[in-house]
Amino acid sequence: MFCPKCGTEVRDEDQFCSKCGASIYGAEPDQQYTSYNAQPQYAPVDNRKSKLVAGLLQLFLGGFGVGRFYLGYTSIGVAQLLVSCLTCGIGAIWPFIDAILILSGQVPADADGNTLKD
Ligand SMILES: [Zn+2]
């Protein structure tokens, strides 16, 4: 076996290292190593976006693509904004339908692929 402190090979029946004198059995783990492993584990943060928030934003502000911007679909949001403006509001039927799709769960994830929470 080997000395836990200096790595020198020592006889199995030895209790102390012949080179550095460290105890072979019950050796204290390195202090830095111990404190490093004692770091508190932080619970993962639930930063998923809300389906309800996205749907309501899209329902009331869908003409500006707000619900889609909220979900990170920037290009779709811009497209809805442009379509609504260029058609003097008639094109806002698209974001309105989009809002229903979001609220009914047809848009399962945001632009980053994170599933939406209810
Ligand atoms: Zn040693």
Image (cartoon, rainbow, N blue to C red):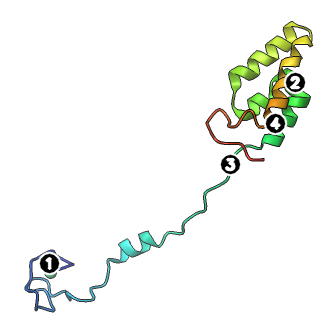
Ligand 1 visible in quadrant: bottom left
- Crowdedness near tag 3: few (<14), some (14–19) or many (≥20) residues, C-alpha within 10 Å: few
Q: CA distance from mark 4 to mark 3?
A: 21 Å
Q: Which mark is residue 47?
A: 3
- Where does label 2 land, which residue? 96
Q: Nearer the viewer, mark 4 or mark 3?
A: 4
Quadrant for the N terminus, please. Answer: bottom left
- Where does label 1 land, which residue? 2
x, y percent for residue 95: 83, 22
Q: Nearer the viewer, mark 2 or mark 1?
A: 2
Q: Earlier in the sequence, mark 2 or mark 1?
A: 1
Q: Earlier in the sequence, mark 1 or mark 4?
A: 1
Q: Is mark 2 within 8 Å of ligand 1?
A: no
Do tag 1 and tag 4 residues touch (Cβ < 8 Å)? no
Amino acid type assigned to the residue bearing label 1 in the image: Phe
Amino acid type assigned to the residue bearing label 3 in the image: Asn
x, y percent for residue 6: 16, 76
115 to 18, vertically: above or below: above
60 to 10, vertically: above or below: above
- Where does label 4 land, which residue? 104
Do tag 2 and tag 3 residues touch (Cβ < 8 Å)? no
Image position of 62 (left or right of 114): right
Image position of 97 (left or right of 15): right
- Crowdedness near tag 1: few (<14), some (14–19) or many (≥20) residues, C-alpha within 10 Å: few
Do tag 4 and tag 3 residues touch (Cβ < 8 Å)? no
